[in-house]
Amino acid sequence: MNSWEKDSLLEKHIVEPVSFSALMSFSFLIWMFVAITHAIAGALDSGSVHYGQPQAMLALEYCLVFLPLSLLNCLLAWLFWRKLELMLQAKLLALLALLSCVAFLPILTVNKIMITTYFDRGVVADLSQEWDRVSPFILWVDFCLILLAFSTQASFAAWRRARAKEQEIELSRSLGLELRLHLLQGQLKPHFLFNALNSITALVRGEDRHLAGNALNQLNGLLRYVVNSGKYEWLSVADELKFVRDYLDMQSLRFGKRLHIEWEIQDRDWEKIPCAPLLFQPLVENAIHHGVENHQENCVIQIDLYVRLGLVHFRIANPLLAGSKAKHGHGLGLSSTRERLDIFFGREASVNTQSLPDRFMAEIIFPDDSQ
């Protein structure tokens, strides 16, 4: 995946907190709400010049007075939405604030004069006369209202940008983990195939073609599972357990009576517990390689599977005979399993190993997410 493809994928997955239409509607209606609230307060306040006036007419008057602020708010919302990064540059931000005040302060003040004069006196105002009556305090209030509209939109735009950056970082991390996970699973498949073919090769060299044919038939089913597992992020513990059983059945054809498996499986509905594909397999392959292949003695491999305190435990133990060289914990199997568990579960999962005088044990622990 090149950088352009990654950026394009990130853009598709970044979710805006609100839609453009919702933002525009809110930007317009918020000042209408302020106008209506102001009108109701004026009509109910006995000390107001508007006391006793019909609330509907007073609300209409105030809505028309605040209309330029609603339009300014919508214009700013549109600019910040369309050109977010550009508009949030310091120089352009200051310039836009200045232009908003210079352009809309006269519009807001003139509109207020025209509307209030018409509703109060029923005549069109003479601006040359009415303008002289506008106090500096009124201009200051209008100036502050314009700055309030501007700062609100600028703050919301800055929050949107910060939120988008957080999403981009999180998505980049998720994409990186996903790519790493696919790489690890891709490493497991040829590793499994190599070990499986070694087992069949040993049967062919032993001139036991009947067993070799049976092993090839079993390998066909195993490979089908391995290939199909790449299509899913999660399978069930039951699926993985069946795969492990089938794999060990194939190995039993090669090693015969030398290989004995002792199963201790807790009575539980393992179909309901999710599990990463091929999670148990590397530990099983290591147990076969170091517990059976390195010598000609009989071998007992113990496999335990149970749930305790909300955690799934998969434990496998194989013998360590004198003269055999065990390299557990240093190959692809355990290292890749640790990394995959870290991607899937973080600190909630672990891979533990223990070397005893005559046995080596490896254990996978991960959360039971069936709840």
Image (cartoon, helix red, strand yellow):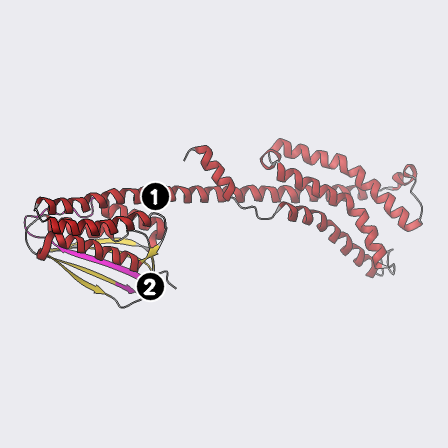
- Looking at the rendered structure, the secondary structure element under dot 1 is helix
Q: Which residues are magenta?
A: 306-331
Three-letter code for the amino acid on which mark 2 is drawn: Gly
Q: Left or right of 233: which side holds 217?
A: left
Q: In the image, residue 202 lies at what x, y percent?
A: 11, 45
Q: Residue at x 76, y 38 (%)?
A: 104
Task: Point out which mark residue 78 bears.
Answer: none
The answer to whether residue 291 shows anywhere in this view is no
Against 110, residue 52 (above or below) is below
* Magenta stretch encompasses residue 336: no
Tell me the CA gap for discs 1 and 2.
27 Å
In this orientation, which residue lies closer to the viewer: 282 or 53? 282
Q: Residue at x 57, y 44 (%)?
A: 160
Q: Left or right of 125: which side holds 254?
A: left
- Looking at the rendered structure, the secondary structure element under dot 2 is loop
Three-letter code for the amino acid on which mark 1 is drawn: His
Residue wearing tag 2: 310
Nearer mark to the viewer, of 1 and 2: 1
Q: Left or right of 166: which side holds 210?
A: left
In this orientation, which residue lies closer to the viewer: 142 or 14? 14
Q: Residue at x 48, y 42 (%)?
A: 168
Tell me which label, 1 or 2, sits earlier in the chain. Answer: 1
Q: Quadrant of the N terminus?
A: top left
Instruction: Classify mark 2: residues with Cα within 10 Å, few (<14), some (14-19) or many (20+).
Output: few
In this orientation, which residue lies closer to the viewer: 246 or 20? 246
Q: In the image, residue 24 lies at what x, y percent?
A: 67, 46
Task: Point out which mark residue 182 bears.
Answer: 1
